[in-house]
Each structure stands twice: as structure tokens, then as C-alpha cells.
Image (cartoon, helix red, strand yellow):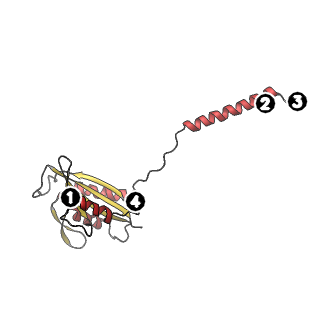
Amino acid sequence: MVMNKKGFMRILEAIIAIIIALGFVIIITPTKAADKVGFPPDLDETTNSILREMQDKPQFRNCVLGAEINFNFGSGNARRTGANCVKGYIDFLTRPIEAHPWNYAVKICKLNDEGETLECDYEPFPPGSSRTVGWNEQDQFFNQQILPTNSDVYIKSTTLSYPDVTGEDIIGFNPNEYRVLTLYAWSKA
């Protein structure tokens, strides 16, 4: 049996051409980007709801802006202000707390119209920290003692600048200042 060398070479050339073409296609085809860690859907829905409430409801908006409000947080009426008010509202929304899979912390910072931080309010307030020290030291205590270091912390924030026109005036509110409300959430597990 005699082998036709020209036919064999053409088949070999065709196979090599197919391999080169497939290699080129594989190289230029975009690969799927690695899945980025995003907000879990239930946490995203909860934090968006909380931020919407703080933006849209005058009493909670004013609470973030520094007014003291009287609200029934499930344990009777309580007068709260700032981060304590926001955290109380989060605890109220996520009852029963034992069944809710997330822990929360709140930071509200007061900024001037140039974007400089004037002061921050934290809840829970870092143990061992003093409200008389500067906000930089309080922030360090908050980051080191309240926020976990062994799990992912999800962060969402919003900016509020003026009280709701339909709500009560806030005594001592400076219209040249605004507040940044930051929610921190992490898994209890």
C-alpha cells in the first residue's frame, strides 16, 4: 500500500490551521470576570429600606440631622437623637433580633460645606472611648472595637443636608453643614 504524501500533508496542514484558528478564538474571546463580592440580596434590601426611611420620613431625617425625636421603638416611647436613634430604628425593623442574621453599627458625621469632618456620632459607642476625645480617636476605637476583623463588613451611606420642609424646625441646625449617615453590617455567623 502506497501512501500519497501530498494528501497526507494537506490533511496535516488543515489540522494545524484549525488548531491555530481555535487558539486565536480562545485568546480573543473575553473571559467572564470573577464574581465580585457584592451585597447579599436580603441585606441590600434591608439597608436600602433603612436609608430610604432616613431620607424620606421627616422624623428620622431630623433624627440624623441632630434633632431629638420621641418614637416607640417597641419598648415604649423613647427620646433619642443621632446614631442612637438610627440604631434604635434598625433594631426595631429587624425584630426579632435573634432571628435576624446581621449585626449593625451606625456612624453619623457632621461635615461643613467644604467637606471637612467636624464630629461623628457612633452607635454602638466604642467601650473605653470617651465622647470628649476628638472624632479621629473615636473613629479608631470604633474601627478597632466595634467592627469585626474576621468577617466581611458591608457599608452603605447617604448624605442629608436639610431638614424636611414639612417637619419641625431643628433648633441649632446650621444650613452650611450636612450629615453623612453610614451603615455597617456584618454576618452574625
Residue pictured at 28% horizontal, 64% vertical: 141
Q: Position of residue 33 (x, y in %)?
A: 48, 45
Residue denoted by label 1: 64
Q: Furthest residue to the top?
A: 6
Q: Secondary structure at mark 3?
A: loop
Q: Amino acid at mark 4?
A: Asp
Residue pictured at 15% horizontal, 63% vertical: 68
Q: Furthest residue to the bottom?
A: 75
Labels 3 and 1: the sequence-earlier one: 3
Residue denoted by label 3: 2
Q: Are marks 3 and 1 in contact (CB under 8 Å)?
A: no
Q: Position of residue 156 (x, y in %)?
A: 32, 55
- What is the distance, in whole Å, between disc 3 and disc 1 at their CAs? 91 Å
Residue denoted by label 4: 152
- What is the distance, in whole Å, between disc 4 and disc 1 at their CAs? 26 Å
- What is the distance, in whole Å, between disc 2 and disc 3 at their CAs? 12 Å
Q: Quadrant of residue 127?
A: bottom left
Q: Amino acid at mark 3?
A: Val
- What is the distance, in whole Å, between disc 2 and disc 1 at their CAs? 81 Å
Residue denoted by label 2: 8
Q: Quadrant of residue 142?
A: bottom left
